[in-house]
Amino acid sequence: MNTYACDGALAQSRPQGWFTPAFTVKRQGSMARWRRRLGVAALGAAMLASLAPAARASLVITGTRVIYNAGSPETTVKMSNEGQAPALMQAWIDDGNAEAKPDEVQVPFFLTPPLARVDPGKGQTLRIFFNGYPDGKTLPSDRESVFWLNVLEVPPKATPEEGHGVLQLTIRSRLKLFYRPKGLPGNPLTAAADLTFKRKANGVLEVHNPTPYYVNLQKLEVGENGAHGSKTPWMLAPLSSDELRLKGTGAKSVQYWAIDDFGGVTPYQAAIAD
């Protein structure tokens, strides 16, 4: 399975028990037969790593992240099928464990529809609702919490040419889902400007996020062209610090590029405190 992270990074992931390619099955019209085709084919998994760069999703998702504002009745995610054939879409939310099966994940959200067929040129809207944890556990009210929206696309089976097999690829996209409590101070669109940077005695750079918002960096460079260190991508949790080991001691500033709620990228520069 090919897994695409929301900020454009590509990673390989195949949760056990979930959809992987099946082979040489003729197209059927009924949804029941579509579901039966989505069994596990372990043979196809070994081929995916080498074929991943050629994989292309037909389902195009609007946006690169999802914001759920506390108190809202719901939030929506739109997608469209830009391909030439129908696609089966499965969606679920996890808490950060990409290997967890959808029916085993405990999250305070549910969405609809969890499974749908999307025809070429047509769209599909996912509706996400906050319903809390079954055991009554609550999310922090002084900072954001992060979850992940998964969208799995399974294309229809192509008819194999005589004597040849056909490998069908499933493509899984993961978008960050941020739960944003009411009344948080500051502006989430400019939270990246509040990051502070400090050189520590053990040769590392401490990056502190004093805001109640997650700050998502597309890239961070220390020194010219990252000569003294770099990291990409980097998600900094709210009200917390993280570290990056430096190369040398001469750097005086950092350059970083932050991704906002709408997927836009803004460059920043800041001094390093000693």
Image (spheres, rainbow, N blue to C red):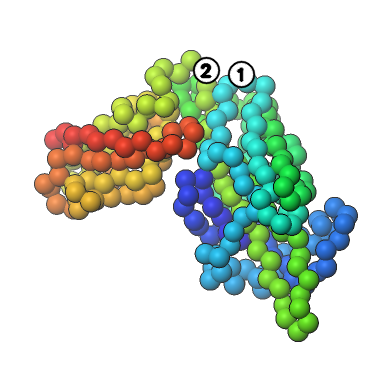
Whole-number angstrom distance, CA of label 2 to CA of label 1:
7 Å
The image position of residue 30, as x and y in percent, is 88, 55
Q: Residue furthest left?
A: 250
Residue type at mark 1 is Gly
Is 130 above or below relative to 272? above
Q: Quadrant of residue 169?
A: bottom right
Residue at the spot x=79%, y=62% of the render?
A: 37
The image position of residue 65, as x and y in percent, is 53, 38
The answer to whether residue 178 is left or right of residue 237 is right
Residue at the spot x=72%, y=77% of the render?
A: 165
Is residue 107 among the parts visible in the rendering? Answer: yes
Residue type at mark 2 is Lys
Q: Residues within 10 Å of mark 1 (few under 14, many from 20)?
A: few
Residue at the spot x=75%, y=39% of the render?
A: 113
Task: Check contact, mark 2 vs mark 1: CB within 8 A.
Answer: yes
Dot 1 lies on which element? loop
Q: Residues within 10 Å of mark 2 (few under 14, many from 20)?
A: some
Is residue 14 among the parts visible in the rendering? Answer: no
Question: Across the whole image, how many numbered discs are drawn on residues?
Answer: 2
Q: Quadrant of residue 45?
A: bottom right
Residue tagged by mark 1?
Answer: 71
The image position of residue 96, as x and y in percent, is 54, 44
Residue tagged by mark 2?
Answer: 182
